Amino acid sequence: MDADHIPDRHLVTYALSLMKAKNVKVLIGYQKHDLGDYGPFGKYYRIIHASSIFSLMARDELGLAPIFTGSVGVFEYEWLKNNRFDDKSITEDWELSLRSYINGSFSHHVTNKVFSHCAVLQDIKWFIRHQIRWAEGTIADFKRHFVSLIKAEKLSVKEKIGLIYQDLLYSQSLVILISFVLSLIFYKVSTMHTISFISAPVIILSLISWLGLFIRGLEIENMKLDISVLVFSFLMIYIMSLFYSYGTVKGLILKKRSWIVTRRRS
Amino acid sequence: MDLYKLKYSLGYTLFTFSSIIFIIVFIELFILNVSIQLGNLTFMTFGYPWPSERVMAYTTFIKMPNFSNSDPNVYFLNYGEMIILSLVSGVIGVNIMEKNLIKAVYSGNNYLSIFFLILFLIFFTISLIAFIKIQVLEAIYYIDGTLYYPYNNG
């Protein structure tokens, strides 16, 4: 848990009994961003965290290697002592889960019932900085562990797919951006209609998945559908892709990384 | 003077109108006007294929000759540029709005309400005129004595 979190009253008892029942070493919980969730951005931030725990739970059921996203988590003491957080990484929670997946000790369970209340980020500027850090750290840690991830014998193919998906989550936007720029250049040279033939289903699929995750997020948080939040989240897809690309390039090229503490509305 | 309320309403207006423009342009560009060419076959949704040069010229926000009158077709703000501008201004609007929301709620100053109403009406009228100009007037045009409109574009 982070220092500014307010834990749920039953967090410890529920988490421990669940860990015993499932016989796992790591319990991945949920950060409920219900403090300062006013305005379109506040609600958007709350919903994306709800949809993120939903996708993690789904990946847990499908065996596609869900990761520990930083908070809330309960670890077995011996397990944490053996693995430890890496203080050189700027996304140490992701690095810990990747490393322990590779050495085969990450037995886990994901739930949204173990949660703590926390505050939304102060504004969009801090959100952008926070997301750049995640994009940068994710790709940098992937670079470090790529060979051992491919070679890892203890991991199943499904888990490897899940981890590689998580690795390349933020760098997708770089690929999309490059292909967008290339399509603009090639459009001038010749009319490439096949591009739209390929991209149209991709756009439709991603729209459906975006809407689906948005609705799941609303369901988890018991919120009503707000059109302004829906529109804002759609705008953010385009705006954030630029910053994700920047973070990915930064993570791929630069070796020096700096840690920032994100300001919140509390 | 209650600056927080002023900033809040500016942010709100910016976000609302940017998102309206974004939705209209997005639907026009990516849903209503998609065409796919496969050999001799052309698959189209509703309107004409975008972005062709002619359509781009007729969907500009402002069309005018330049100052020396040497070029009669100077185009300002086509759909592609407008969608990018509306994206950026929408997010900036939300940022301005939320920064001032709490302070605006807790300040009991109502003197400027009429000012905000007028501001809203001005923005609304400008957007309405722009909407009519782009969606209605610019979609119908003559070339060499033939009337072109969205479902009869030759």
Image: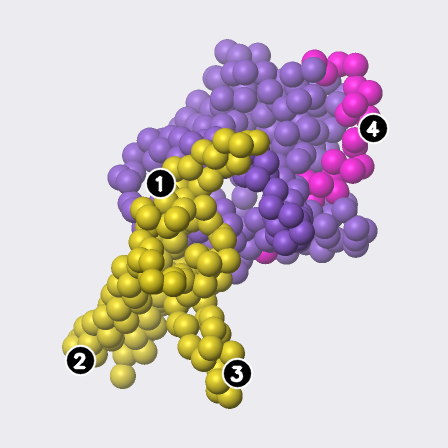
Answer few, some or many: residues within 10 Å of disc 1's Cα (few below 14, many 20 plus, some between 14 and 19).
Answer: some
Q: Give the range drawn in magenta.
A: A129-156
Q: Which amino acid does label 3 sit on?
A: Ser
Q: What is the number of the mark on residue A147?
A: 4
Same-chain check, marks 2 and 4: no
Tag nearer the camera, 2 or 3: 3
Judging depth in this view, the residue of A104 and B83 nearest the camera is: B83
Answer few, some or many: residues within 10 Å of disc 3's Cα (few below 14, many 20 plus, some between 14 and 19).
Answer: few
Above or below: residue A116 compared with residue B117: above
Question: What percent of the width, then of the height, locates residue A209?
Answer: 45, 31
Viewport quadrant of the C terminus of chain A: bottom left
List the residue tagged with mark 3. Answer: B70
Above or below: residue A195 compared with residue B153: above
Q: In this view, does B95 lie to the left or right of B37?
A: left
Tag nearer the camera, 2 or 1: 1
Res. A128 image quadrant: bottom right
What residue is rendered at 23% in x and 70% in y?
A: B125
Q: What is the number of the mark on residue A143?
A: none
Task: Check the rendered structure and report the hue given to chain B.
Answer: yellow
Same-chain check, marks 3 and 1: yes
Q: What residue type is labelled 2?
A: Tyr
Q: Distance between the residues labelled 2 and 4?
A: 66 Å
Q: Distance between the residues labelled 3 and 4?
A: 63 Å
List the residue tagged with mark 1. Answer: B46
What residue is rendered at 38% in x and 62% in y?
A: B143
Name, please, the residue furthest toward the bottom.
B68
**Residue A137 counted in the magenta span:** yes
